[in-house]
């Protein structure tokens, strides 16, 4: 009797916990852009100077600057991550105007000072790069009035000596100031600059000068970025995919549960319960670990439900086999559990090997899928072996279930083999 | 019951000879088809843009085409209309302005339209494909090492042959029927590998167990062991294949449009996975093992 109470308590308490926490957990799960809509860009970074290498430090700096800019868009939690040695992935949820994003991300303030190297064919061409964004003091640009009361933007150079040398070398020659590929001004050097400041003057209005200052101060990017991949998903489309796939998953799961119960009766019922606990745990892990759930991730969960019952099918088939050999129910369950354990471990470990490789080599969606698969297999071993066996044993030791029919085995089949 | 008994009493080793013939024939057709037609790559693998539009009103292909003409992006474009969805595939990468103009034009037709735009650089695509190949390679190596340690090398070889068979069959069918290969296809193939090996190992585990309690003297003993092991696990193999198949089938029928090809690949792969575990992997192990058994017999 005690065991029956224990069994009921475990089931009721587990169900209550799941029912109570599920809505909150589901709300917490971080959805990928393919499900909630948004814009994703993958940039490849290269240095401005030919022959130079992309360093880890410069890549991180670029990523930080991008993040700052993304924050200015006012989207919630922009995600900026570096990938490999020279890539930056940018994810923005709920962005509607991709053009705006592209402009803001790429356009601003890759400020360069350039001079002529003699091979230029047009007067506004300057091929030799003298100073790049990182050579300037970050966020130090300001607007001041020149002698003619015209607004000009003043920027500070980090290395005064270097700037002095450049201006000395270019004495009486032009030193052009570029913002990206846009020529801002091309003053002729009239004096060697030793104070480390340079000014950009044009016929700016006060407003134009302020805008230019802000653009420069937004943070100079140490690296040049080119777009390698982009994906934009409308919010409606994302929601539609989410709804359809979740529905498909629920219907599939229902069929699988019906199959398990029809096939294995009481152990099937327990397996079904284990399966629900398994799915709940999966969501719990995703919620706590703050993993991002993508559309392929949901597909992995749905497929995983099908695969997770495998452990139960193996165990139950084995138990039935032992029963048909004429063993008692208790010893059949024991032997079945023991024999199937090794099978389940070996078969799942090989699947984990594949999933881990997929995680290592995958990018984006592939990684998301592999992650679900790994978490799922580990959890399925926990719930479908330990948890469901624990429940089954409670019932058996309580003296219930002592007839083969509860296992879906016909009396007439026993001893058939 | 009689069906079950029949299944359990089949001579799997014998049947497998026919299966080898079928699989080899399919493989040859696949290789020919792949080398002539290749795969129908989506933008994930080929430079270009893919625009998916979810519509609330009926917009026909005839309405879309003039827009593309006008924007000068119609060349090589493929428009696939659907009930509430239109997919336009461009062989060139749309630039920001074209992208913007296209959206504006379509919003004029349907103000509630929702877009999904994918753009890939060809370099990126090559890298994706290379990584997929590396993933398959390393997965196979990992499995060979693990199975060789836990079982023996013959099991490892048989398992890897059968999983490569499954993966290749899916690739071949996608080539033959000109189905679109996108990024999720890679996931599907890798998952099929994971599933197929899982299935195979369950049967191998049983062979390993049965080997322990038997003394092998003749080739017939070995055949008996393989047949017995397959028949003991056949119901499990079928049931598990069925449950995963249910999951994949519903994803295919009801799931989101962007994982359609993934689900289709999974459905095909699962069927081949179940088939190869039963009819290819174990009989192949038998072939390898019987060679070893025969050698000392001849020597003595």
Image (tube, rainbow, N blue to C red):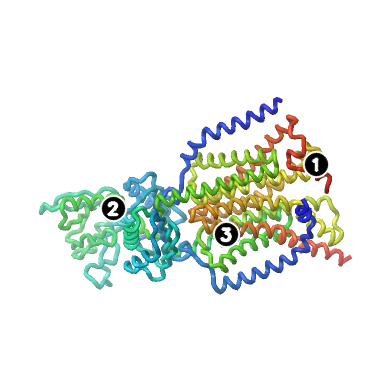
The reply to whether residue B129 is in sight is yes
**Helix, strand or loop at mark 1:** helix
Outermost residue on the right side: it is B300
> Which residue is identified by label 3?
B265
Separation of residues labelled 2 and 3 (CA atoms): 53 Å
Q: Chain of mark 3?
A: B
Outermost residue on the left side: it is A148
> Which residue is identified by label 1?
A411
* Residue at screen point 66% across, 30% down: A7
Q: Quadrant of the N terminus of chain A?
A: top right
For the residue carrying disc 1, how many other residues have a C-alpha within 10 Å: few (<14), some (14-19), or many (20+)? few
B100 up-or-down from A11: above or below: below
> Which residue is identified by label 2?
A136
* Residue at screen point 60% across, 73% down: B32
A173 up-or-down from A148: above or below: below
Residue situated in front as seen by the camera: A142 or B98: B98
A4 up-or-down from A222: above or below: above
Residue situated in front as seen by the camera: A65 or B33: B33
Q: Picture coordinates of residue B193 (x, y %)?
A: 62, 57
Q: Is residue A61 left or right of residue B144?
A: left
**Helix, strand or loop at mark 3:** helix
For the residue carrying disc 2, how many other residues have a C-alpha within 10 Å: few (<14), some (14-19), or many (20+)? many
Separation of residues labelled 1 and 2 (CA atoms): 86 Å
The reply to whether residue B229 is in sight is no
Q: Picture coordinates of residue B168 (x, y %)?
A: 61, 64
Mark sitting earlier along the chain (1/2): 2
Q: Chain of mark 2?
A: A
Q: Picture coordinates of residue A298 (x, y %)?
A: 52, 48
Residue situated in front as seen by the camera: B66 or A26: B66
| Number of the front mark, 1 or 2 | 1
Q: Picture coordinates of residue A60 (x, y %)?
A: 40, 51
Q: Is residue A269 left or right of residue B51?
A: right
């Amino acid at each position: 009797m005690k065991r029956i109470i224990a069994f009921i308590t475990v089931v009721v308490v587990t169900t209550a916990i799941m029912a109570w926490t599920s809505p909150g957990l589901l709300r917490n799960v971080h959805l990928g852009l393919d499900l909630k809509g948004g814009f994703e860009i993958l940039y490849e970074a290269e240095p401005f100077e030919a022959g130079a290498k992309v360093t880890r430090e410069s890549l991180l700096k670029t990523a930080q600057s991008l993040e700052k800019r993304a924050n200015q868009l006012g989207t919630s939690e922009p995600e900026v991550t570096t990938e490999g040695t020279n890539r930056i992935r940018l994810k923005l949820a709920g962005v509607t105007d991709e053009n705006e994003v592209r402009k803001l991300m790429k356009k601003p303030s890759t400020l360069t000072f350039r001079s002529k190297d003699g091979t230029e064919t047009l007067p506004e061409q300057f091929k030799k790069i003298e100073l790049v964004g990182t050579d300037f003091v970050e966020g130090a640009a300001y607007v001041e009035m020149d002698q003619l009361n015209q607004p000009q933007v003043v920027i500070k150079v980090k290395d005064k000596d270097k700037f002095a040398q450049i201006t000395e070398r270019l004495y009486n020659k032009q030193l052009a100031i570029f913002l990206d590929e846009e020529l801002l001004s091309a003053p002729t050097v009239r004096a060697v600059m030793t104070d480390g400041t340079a000014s950009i003057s044009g016929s700016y209005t006060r407003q134009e000068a302020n805008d230019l200052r802000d653009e420069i101060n937004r943070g100079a990017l140490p690296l040049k970025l080119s777009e390698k991949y982009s994906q934009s998903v409308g919010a409606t489309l994302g929601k539609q995919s989410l709804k359809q796939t979740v529905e498909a998953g629920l219907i599939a799961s229902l069929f699988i549960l019906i199959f398990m119960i029809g096939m294995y009766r009481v152990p099937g019922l327990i397996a079904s319960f284990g399966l629900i606990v398994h799915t709940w745990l999966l969501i719990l892990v995703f919620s706590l670990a703050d993993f991002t759930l993508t559309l392929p991730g949901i597909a992995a969960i749905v497929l995983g439900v099908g695969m997770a019952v495998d452990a139960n099918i193996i165990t139950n088939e084995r138990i039935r086999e032992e029963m048909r050999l004429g063993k008692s129910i208790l010893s059949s369950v024991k032997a079945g559990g023991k024999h199937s354990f090794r099978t389940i471990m070996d078969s799942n470990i090989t699947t984990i090997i594949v999933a881990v490789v997929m995680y290592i080599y995958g990018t984006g969606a592939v990684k998301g899928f592999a992650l679900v698969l790994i978490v799922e297999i580990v959890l399925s071993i926990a719930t479908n072996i330990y948890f469901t066996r624990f429940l089954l044993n409670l019932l058996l030791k309580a003296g219930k279930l002592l007839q083969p029919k509860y296992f879906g085995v016909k009396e007439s089949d026993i001893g058939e083999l | 019951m009689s069906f079950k008994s029949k299944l359990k009493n089949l001579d799997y080793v014998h049947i497998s000879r026919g299966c080898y013939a079928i699989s080899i024939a399919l493989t040859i057709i696949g290789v020919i088809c792949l080398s002539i037609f290749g795969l129908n790559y989506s933008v994930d693998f080929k430079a270009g843009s893919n625009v998916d539009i979810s519509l609330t009103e009926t917009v026909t292909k005839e309405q879309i085409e003039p827009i593309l003409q006008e924007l000068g992006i119609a060349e090589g474009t493929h428009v696939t209309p659907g009930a509430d969805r239109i997919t336009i595939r461009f062989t060139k990468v749309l630039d920001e302005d074209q992208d913007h103009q296209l959206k504006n034009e379509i919003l004029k037709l349907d103000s509630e339209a929702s877009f999904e735009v994918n753009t890939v650089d060809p370099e990126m695509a090559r890298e994706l494909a290379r990584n997929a190949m590396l993933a398959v390679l390393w997965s196979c190596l990992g499995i060979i090492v693990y199975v060789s340690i836990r079982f023996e090398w013959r099991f490892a070889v048989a398992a890897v042959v059968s999983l490569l068979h499954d993966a290749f069959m899916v690739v071949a069918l996608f080539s033959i029927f000109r189905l679109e290969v996108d990024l999720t296809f890679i996931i599907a193939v890798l998952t099929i590998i994971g599933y197929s090996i899982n299935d195979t190992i369950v049967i191998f585990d049983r062979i390993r167990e049965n080997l322990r309690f038997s003394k092998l003297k003749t080739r017939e003993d070995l055949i008996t062991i393989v047949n017995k092991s397959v028949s003991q696990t056949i119901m499990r193999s079928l049931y598990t294949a069925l449950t995963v198949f249910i999951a994949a089938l519903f994803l295919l029928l009801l799931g989101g449009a962007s994982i359609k090809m993934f689900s289709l690949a999974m459905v095909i792969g699962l069927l081949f996975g179940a088939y190869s575990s039963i009819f290819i992997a174990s009989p192949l192990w038998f072939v390898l093992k019987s060679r070893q058994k025969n050698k000392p017999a001849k020597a003595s």
